[in-house]
Amino acid sequence: MADAAPEPGTAGPASLPLPDEPVGGERMGECGTVLPAGAPPPPVGITAASWLIADLDTGEVLAAKDPHGRHRPASTIKLLTALVAVETLPLDRVVTTTRVDADIEGSSAGIGPGGRYTVRQLLAGLLLVSGNDTAHALARTIGGQPTTLAAMNARARELGATDTRAGTPSGLDVPGMSSSAYDMALIFREVLRTPALARLLATPEVTFPGYRDHSRYLLGNQNRLLATYEGALGGKTGFTDDARHTFLGAAERDGHRLVAVLMRAEQKPTRTWEQAARLLDYGFALEPGTDVGRLVTGPPEPEPATTTPPPAQDDLAAGRSPSGGADPASSSPDSAGTGTGTVIGSLLAGTAVLAGVLALLLRTRRDPRS
């Protein structure tokens, strides 16, 4: 059950398929900086390989850089873990934690073996201090890590997050783990639509239970943007060696709620929460009604099947070809008086050929060597 790296030499899962068209609009498929026509250049000092600014209410993407670039999400994937947990478990359910929960590597909320925590308290540890221990306890309570990951990935597909594949509920790196700035904005918007999670993300600190003879203590929100940016609504930090720094931050100003997402960023020369603040300032300053794409909730629609309709019986009887012109055989002098017989003969021959093709296909599908 522990989040662990795969065995050396183990092949990772195949890459996620690419949609036929970029999700969110044509410009969302661009790899460089994507700005509205006439917009000023983006802020200096943004170190992220991929970033995005979007309006959380209208879904408009205001500006971006390589929005569908696939990167490791690190602990920002905990937003998806939280979404699945709150949709699966009663918030007041009491969970008794284990030594395995407590010993998960990485960031920790400090839960202990034999501790008793509500799901709400575990979610606080997950979102405020990015506890890998609370992520493990929640996944175990949902039904185990495989069940939780299946639910997380199904939820991502349901949202239309086609770049996202969760490999661990905590964000610890495993092969095949990925997301994008576009997808994280989609997921974060859904999280903010969930009142219990929105309240936790906006909470500066909570009192967290102790365990056994350990006293209770305070958990402070690690998102520095919350305490320093006017109108901040909350966000999520993340870091692993492979992912580098990831960050989401949202704020409200003059009735507009924007989110800024950074993927694969560095903390130098500017910390990621400060970079997010610059992107939010830039987004709020853009002219209203300008956008480069849109957050689209829901899986991409499949391409409609194209079929050629069969020829109408009236056309066949009149000796016309399916394209609407006269059948050359029926209009030639040598075919006078025999058009119907020629058509029937052609149909019978065509049916025989079709039956032969279908039989061959069936034999091929049943052949285990194929």
Image (cartoon, rainbow, N blue to C red):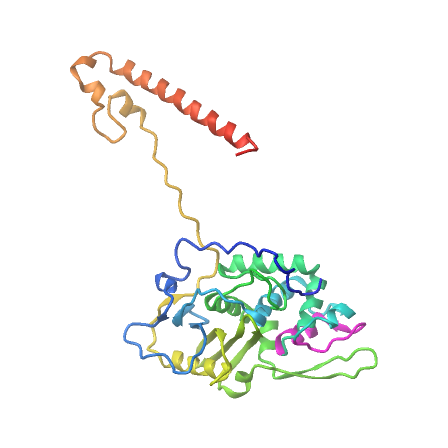
- Image check: 325 left or right of 246? left
Q: Which residues are magenta?
A: 107-128
Q: Is residue 161 above or below residue 92?
A: above
Total numbered labels placed on residues in the image: 0
* Quadrant of the rendered image containing residue 139: bottom right
Is residue 100 something that shows in the picture?
Answer: yes
Q: Can you give x and y, in whole percent of width and height, for residue 344 in the image?
A: 32, 17
Residue at x 22%, y 18% (from the top left corner): 330
Quadrant of the snapshot with the N terminus:
bottom right
Q: Is residue 344 magenta?
A: no
Specify whether 214 is left or right of 283. right
Expressed as whole percent of the image width and height from the top left, the position of residue 134 reads 69, 71
Residue 106 place in picture, x, y as percent: 66, 74
Q: Is residue 96 visible?
A: no
109 magenta-colored: yes
* Vertical position of residue 21 compared to residue 312: above or below: below
**Residue extending furthest front?**
9
Q: Nearer the viewer, residue 106 or 323?
A: 106
Q: Which residue in the rendered view is the most extreme toward the right?
A: 213
Q: Position of residue 22 (x, y in %)?
A: 40, 59
What residue lies at 34% left-to-right and 76% top-to-bottom? 288
Q: Quadrant of residue 141?
A: bottom right
Q: Residue at x 79, y 78 (%)?
A: 211
Q: Is residue 368 above or below residue 124?
A: above
